[in-house]
Image (cartoon, rainbow, N blue to C red):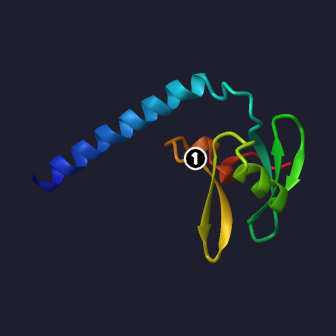
Amino acid sequence: MNQKDFEKVYEQYKQQGEQQAQSEAGETNPDGREEFVAVKKNDDGDIIAFKTNTGRELDYLQALDEAKSGRIAHIDVFHKYGRDIIRSEPDGIKENNLDNLPEF
């Protein structure tokens, strides 16, 4: 395979992921779990708090506990830099990434 073939296959892969994410977005949250809809950032641009679709405001540790227990939809927790970190599920949609949510 040449470079162009690799790029073509990768573009097909990305398009399939975006189509799947959009179709899943139609059913956004069938089990009724809360979702993060806004964030609060500090002066360095770090996310320090989250607001859910029910209006609850959670500090980072509260949000981490809720995400770990599966009560927040579309969120992953992973371990990096010696600590647990919250991130949005990778779905190919940049608009719903935590950094792109509106601030409250």
45 or 92: which is nearer to us? 92
Which x, y percent locates residue 46?
A: 74, 66
Q: Name which quarter of the figure residue 49 lies in.
A: bottom right
Q: Which residue is mark 1?
A: 89
Image coordinates for residue 51, horizontal then vertical, percent: 83, 45
**Residue displayed at 89% across by 38% down:** 55
Task: Sort mark 1 into few (<14), some (14-19) or many (20+) by Cα contacts within 10 Å.
Answer: some
Give the quarter of the image for residue 60.
bottom right
Number of marks drawn: 1
Query: Residue 9: percent from the left, percent from the top?
Result: 23, 43
Front residue of this view, candidates 7 and 85: 85
Q: Quadrant of residue 59?
A: bottom right
Task: Identify the residue at horizontal 76%, vertical 46% (top origin).
Answer: 102
Q: Residue reaching furthest left?
A: 1
Nearer to me, 26 or 84: 84
Front-most of 100 and 89?
Answer: 89
Q: Secondary structure at mark 1?
A: loop
Q: Give x and y (percent) for residue 83.
A: 67, 72
In the displayed image of the protein, which residue is found farthest to the bottom?
82
Is 37 on the left-hand or right-hand side of 1? Answer: right
Going by the picture, which residue comes out furthest to the front?
69
Q: Residue at x 17, y 50 (%)?
A: 4
| Left or right, residue 2 beside residue 76 | left
Compared to residue 48, the image places residue 74 above or below, namely above
Residue type at numbered disc 1: Glu
